[in-house]
Image: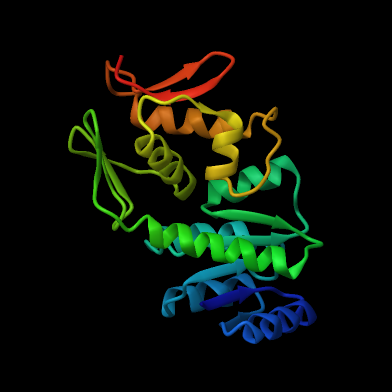
């Protein structure tokens, strides 16, 4: 993997660089958010690992700027900010995974491998359901030929629904597959993202496709 590590604590950054390079990966370092955005938009990376609280530009702002420039590389937050609100802000900004500090390096490495594997596996043919069309190569989605502007997490959530149409997906299934970490299924984070997605997929159409199955989960269904 060719990684970008955006971390203002130099001892942590150098330690992680050393461990990744021992595994055969190459690592570029950035020590503040502005430098992180500059490197992310000037080079091609397989993955970005980013702290949240940093000088010049925090991780949330840096991620939004990277996404606004059309860069879809997976971003993993490695941070001590791990409250539900912090996690929600991270996914709203466009991150793909969230690992709180302190952490074990093997867990971080496994998370990185999972993100790379998921991105590789998603490069398949277009997926169609009803009047929805999803292109994994461009990570674009259309309904009735109108392109939907989805965040990174909303895209992954809809892709999961479209890969499993007419099936009820429980909160625990969605948490494990979409969020890549063990969220508390009794919090409202999953519901929040389902609502975000419904607003974009169903709001302007008479036929609602994303259905809540009370007490069980959610499903993508035409009826």
Location of residue 176 in the rendering, given as x and y in whole percent from the top left corner: 59, 42
Residue name at image x 61 percent, y 50 percent: 90
Give 174 or 29, whichever is nearer the viewer: 174
Height in image: 127 above or below 12?
above
Image-based side of 72 in relation to 113, left or right: left
Quarter of image, res 17: bottom right
Give 56 or 190, whichever is nearer the viewer: 190
Location of residue 42 in the rendering, given as x and y in whole percent from the top left corner: 42, 79
Q: Is residue 74 visible?
A: no
| The C terminus - image quarter | top left
Image-based side of 110 in relation to 67, left or right: right
Location of residue 213 in the rendering, given as x and y in whole percent from the top left corner: 50, 16
Location of residue 75 in the rendering, given as x and y in whole percent from the top left corner: 54, 62
Height in image: 199 above or below 123?
above
Residue name at image x 58 percent, y 65 percent: 112
Residue name at image x 54 percent, y 76 percent: 3
Quarter of image, res 55: bottom right
């Amino acid at each position: 993997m060719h990684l970008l590590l955006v971390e203002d604590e130099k001892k942590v950054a150098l330690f992680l660089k050393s461990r990744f390079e021992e595994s055969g990966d190459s690592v570029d370092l950035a020590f503040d958010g502005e430098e992180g955005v500059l490197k992310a938009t000037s080079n091609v990376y397989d993955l970005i690992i980013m702290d949240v609280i940093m000088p010049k530009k925090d991780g949330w702002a840096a991620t939004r700027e990277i996404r606004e420039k059309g860069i879809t590389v997976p971003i993993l937050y490695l941070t001590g900010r791990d409250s539900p609100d912090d996690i929600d802000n991270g996914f709203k900004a466009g991150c793909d995974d969230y690992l709180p500090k302190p952490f074990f390096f093997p867990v971080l490495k496994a998370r990185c491998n999972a993100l790379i594997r998921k991105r590789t596996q998603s490069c398949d043919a277009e997926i169609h359901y009803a009047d929805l069309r999803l292109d994994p190569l461009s990570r674009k989605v259309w309904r009735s030929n109108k392109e939907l502007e989805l965040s990174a997490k909303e895209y992954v959530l809809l892709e999961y629904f479209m890969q499993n149409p007419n099936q009820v997906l429980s909160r625990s299934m969605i948490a494990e597959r979409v969020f890549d970490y063990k969220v508390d299924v009794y919090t409202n984070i999953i519901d929040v993202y389902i609502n975000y997605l419904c607003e974009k997929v169903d709001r302007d159409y008479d036929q609602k496709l994303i259905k809540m199955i009370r007490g069980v989960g959610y499903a993508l269904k035409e009826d």
